[in-house]
Image: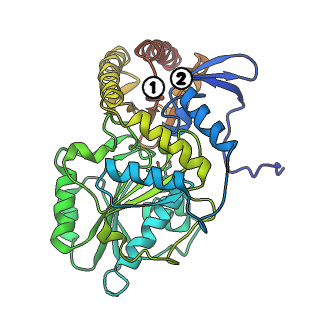
Amino acid sequence: MITPVMPTYNRIPLSFERGEGAWLVATDGRRFLDFGAGIAVNVLGHAHPALVEAVSAQAAKVWHVSNLYEIPEQRMLAEALVDATFADTVFFTNSGTEAAEGGIKLVRKYWAAEPSRTRCIAFEGAFHGRSTGAIAAAGGAKLTEGFGPLMPGFEHLPFGDIPALEATMDERVAAVFIEPIQGEGGIRTLPDGALKAIRAACDRVGALLVLDEVQCGMGRTGQLFAHERAGITPDVMLVAKGIGGGFPLGAILATEAAAAPMVAGSHGSTYGGNPLGCAVGVRVMQTVNTPDFLGAVRAKGGFMQQRLGALAANHPDLIEEVRGEGLMLGLRLTEGHAPAALVDVAREEGLLLVPAADRVVRLLPPLSITEDELAEGCARLDRAAGSIARVAA
Ligand code: PLP
C-alpha cells in the first residue's frame, strides 16, 4: 500500500526528538552516539550554539529574497570560500546533487565552442547525486537502471586506475570528475600521487578537473578540502553536506577561467544562496576553517585509526580492513558479512553508523566530537562486533 511519504527509502523505525553535540535523543528517550552525522553533514554536531545563534538571528531578519537582489550573507560566504581555496568564484545551490548538475552544465558550456569536446571521464563506484546528469556521471546500475535514456558523454574507469586514464585522455575529453575519497562507494581512497597524475593528465589535453568534495570536504579529512594534501588544485569543485552544518546548502567553486562562460542567464536557482543558508554557512566556515579545529580533526582521526586497528585485530573474522582519512572512516567487512547487519546491532548498542558499498560500514562522526565520545563509540562498536561474531559462530 502506498504511504503518504513516497516509499523511496528503507527507513529504520526510529525518530529523534533532539540532538546535543554528538548525541541524538530518540522520541522514546533512548540516547544514541551519532557516528553518521546525517551522512557526513552535521560537522558541528547537533544544536551547536554558534549555528543555533546564526540561524535564529538570520531568521529574525530575512529568510529569502531571491537572486534578483544582492544577498550580503551570500557574498560573505563566497568571499570566505574564495579566500580559503583555489577558487575565484562560487555559485550556491541547495544540495550536492545541484552542485554536481551545475558542474556538469559548467563543463558543457565551457566547451560549447568546441563540439568535439564531449567526453567526460568518471570512475566506477562514484556517487554524485540523483539528478539525471548526476546518475549518468556516476554510471552505476543501481542508480541508473530504469532511468534511461541517460545523458550521453560519460565514460567510466576503475577508481584510481591512472594508466587507464592516461591511455584514454585525448583532446575530446572535456573534463574528469572524481571524488578524492569515494564516500557512498565505500570510503575508497586514491593511491598516493594519483590526484597529481590526474591533474597532469587533464593539463596534457586541456581538460577540466572537477573534484566532488561533497562528502570528503569541509574539514572531514582534517584538511579543509581533501585534495589539499595532494598539492594540486582543481578547476571546479563541488561542495555541500558539511558546508551547511545541517542546513541544505551546496556550492560550485571554480577558477575564473573555468567559470568564464557562466554569465548572467546561464544558470540559476530560486533558493540557492539564500540568506538563511549562507548565514549558517559563514558560521560553519568561521568555526571549521581554523588551524586548531582542523588539527584536532587530524588528531582525532589518528586516535580512531589506532582504536579501529585494535578493533579489527580483535574481530578478524568480521573486519578485513580499516579505511579512510581524518574522521571519514570505513570498516570493510569480510566476505559474507553485510554492512547493514553491523549497523543494526551497533544501533542496539546505542551507536549510529552508515552502510556503504563495497562491504563497508562508514564512521562519519561530527568533527566537533570529543576523544572520550570517540572512545565510547569504539567500545560500543566492539560490543556490536562481538555479538555479530557470536551469531556467525
Ligand atoms: N556527491 C557526493 C560525493 C555525495 O556523497 C553526495 C551525497 O551523498 C552527493 C554528491 C549528492 O548530494 P545531495 O544528497 O546533497 O544531493
Residue sitting at 31 percent across and 50 percent down? 85
SS at circle 1: loop
The residue pinned by badge 2 equals 22
Q: Is mark 1 within 8 Å of ligand 1?
A: no
Task: Tell me: residue 46, above or below residue 69.
Answer: above
Q: Residues within 10 Å of mark 1 (few under 14, many from 20)?
A: many
Q: State the separation of the CA atoms marked 1 and 2.
A: 8 Å
Q: Are marks 1 and 2 in contact (CB under 8 Å)?
A: yes
Q: Nearer the viewer, residue 109 or 381?
A: 109
SS at circle 2: loop
Mark 1 and mark 2 lie on one chain; the one further toward the N terminus is 2
Judged left or right of residue 279, residue 59 is: right
The residue pinned by badge 1 equals 368
Q: Examine the rendering and report whether any part of residue 248 can be seen.
A: no
Q: Position of residue 322 (x, y in %)?
A: 33, 29
Residue sitting at 48 percent across and 49 percent down? 240
- Kind of residue at badge 2: Ala
Q: Nearer the viewer, mark 1 or mark 2?
A: 1
- Kind of residue at badge 1: Ser
Q: Examine the rendering and report whether any part of residue 6 can be seen.
A: yes
Q: Nearer the viewer, residue 61 or 25?
A: 61
Task: Tell me: residue 158, above or below residue 176.
Answer: above
Q: Position of residue 62 (x, y in %)?
A: 67, 50
